[in-house]
Image: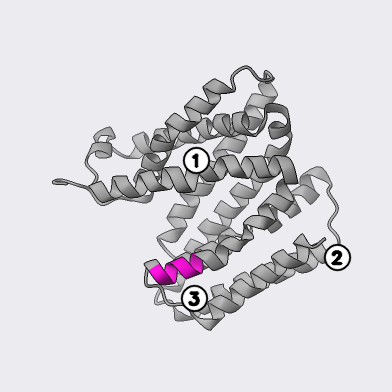
Amino acid sequence: MPGALPVDAVTLLALRMALAAPAFGLMAFRSRSGASLSGREWLALAAIGLAGYYGASILDFWGLQYISAGLERLILFTYPTLTLLLGLVLFKKPLHGRDWGAIALTYVGVAVAFGHDLQLADDSRAVWIGTGLVLASSLSYAVYLSGSGQLIARLGSARFTALAMGVATSATLVHYLAVRPWDDFLRQSGSVYGFALGMALVSTILPVFMQSAAIKMMGAGRAALVGMVGPLVTILFGWMLLDEAVSAWQLGGAALVIAGIVLISRR
């Protein structure tokens, strides 16, 4: 497309959320007859929506500008252990010896991959910045998971997801309009629109509804743990699609992360 602009994290996220918005709007309309919310519950819903799919997404996109997709995914998938820790701190849910062992394995695995990338990086400062951003993204998503259980039980998974994503979409578009001219939306290349549409369908609409349904059936902690297969899949796709080098250190770190998942999910 003539005059197409280089796409950045804010623009891509805004396109993704805007394309997904009709599905969430339709679901919110279809489930509008459910339980009413108090003012405090609306505030909680807004905070959870901002944390889960605005804060977590933008921080993750920013972090990917500094570190590899493989390391990013390993760091991001600390969110199940962070969810368990938040459950301990916020809701007094006890952790047992196997839980602590799984948490230790997970963070040792991340440390192995991080140390390897740091050693090979031309700019170690970029690795630290990217790691910090992605870890903040992981914490933000853990807040979403930890706080969503009660609202999902009250609203149902579909209505909760639609409303929370409405909050996240609104925040994303406000952010975009604050830093970019609105007509930049119309000046992207066809490939950018194609990628954004794919992300809206495959990485946004389907996963968020399935995640909410899983939380309703399994609880936040166990649902988060099942999603921990992501590190190995992302390392594989990074190698296949992005030509990223896969080292024994990355695979070893991923193996430790997966071992932590297996340990804690057998409880």
Taking the spot 49% from the left edge, 26% from the top edge, the residue there is 26
Disc 1 is placed on an element classified as helix
What is the three-letter code of the residue carrying label 1?
A: Ile
Place of residue 40 in the rendered image (x, y in percent of width and height, measured from the top left): 69, 24
Can residue 128 be seen here?
Answer: no
Q: Main secondary structure of the magenta part?
A: helix
Q: Which mark is residue 117?
A: 3
Question: Whole-percent x and y of residue 76?
Answer: 57, 59
- Residue type at tag 3: Asp
- Which numbered disc flags the more N-terminal residue, 3 or 1? 3
- Residue furthest to the bottom in view is 248
Q: What is the magenta range?
A: 234-240
Q: Is residue 30 magenta?
A: no
Which residue position is annotated with label 2?
97
**Quick one: SS at disc 3?**
helix
Q: Residue at x 49, y 75 (%)?
A: 117
Say if mark 1 contacts mark 2, CB within 8 Å: no
Pointer 1: what residue?
Answer: 205
